Image (cartoon, helix red, strand yellow):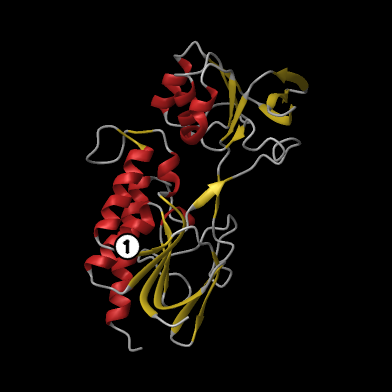
Amino acid sequence: MSDIYDLIIIGAGPAGITAGVYAARKKMNLLIITKDIGGQAAWSGDVENYTGYQFITGPELAEKFEEHMRKYGIKVRDNEEAKDIRREGNLVIVKTDLDTYRARAVIVASGKRSRELGVEGEKEFKNKGVTFCATCDGPLFSGKEVAVIGGGNSALDAALQMMEISPKVYIINITSELTGDPIMIEKIKGSPRVEIWNNSRVKSIYGDSFVKGMKIEKEGKEYDLKVKGIFVEIGLIPNSEFASSLERNKGGEIVVDCYNHTNVEGIFSAGDVTNVPEKQIIIACGEGSKASLAAFKYLSTHRF
């Protein structure tokens, strides 16, 4: 622990990368710490609502984000996970699973992760038929019957991807109706390959070496669905456990104001890990740029 950075950014999804680009252009002494590069953007399927691209896949967009970031020669600690962050004196200390770092300001842009079902067989068959990323793992199930768990946009995105390569896609939705974007619902309902199970919940997952099926409860009755792949898309959890010194809401999201300030001086936050509404790639990018500019103003107006 020797260098004192102007700014440390935790996370390299759309918010973190954009914050990094803005910080690099302001000539800040900068470090990005991240478990992975691209964040949730790299998991998305077809992206049709990112300004400037009428159509681009999530992995392609994430690759362009990284390419833009690398252009500035930003120092990145990849495959490193933040474990604690707190203010000590006039500096912010970031502890990871590998090292400890000091900075005058920090932006937390650590994003969210997939929520698990918490049912029997889920952990046992993770990566053996149970997956949380259709973009990453979908091709492995080409020609096989699969199920998507959830009814929001992430679930519909997974179903749209899978219905192109699977003979049958079951959508298991706990609510009475799908809740995603109308255009996505229209596409889903227009496919003869998709069967929607509303008011349904997964009771258990079973198999041998790999998934063979799952037990479903619908309106008090139990059903057995034979599927080879199960895509869990039931929402996201903020990656904020390490930020216990920051104010968080009941959902675990870091509370920020319109300038991306947290309740701790010198610590800012941006993107899906915050309480900013509407978790969209373009919003995360905008929040990342705001946080970086706010951090620059903070550094410019304080003595260290």
179 lies left or right of 200:
left
Q: Secondary structure at mark 1?
A: helix
The answer to whether residue 44 of the structure is visible from this angle is: yes
Seen in the picture, residue 299 relative to 238 is either above or below; the reply is below
Q: Is residue 155 visible?
A: no
In this rendering, position of residue 260 left or right of residue 56? right
107 sits to left or right of 112: left
What residue is drawn where x is 49% and y is 23%?
162
Task: Quarter of the image for the C terminus: give it.
Answer: bottom left
x and y percentages locating residue 16 in the rendered image: 38, 58
* Residue that carries the numbered disc 1 in the rendered image: 20
Q: Amino acid at mark 1?
A: Gly
From the viewer's side, name the closer residue of 171 and 81: 81
Q: Residue 300: horizontal and vertical position, in percent?
A: 27, 80
| Residue lying at 68% horizontally and 18% vertically, measured from the top left | 226
Residue situated in front as seen by the camera: 233 or 99: 99
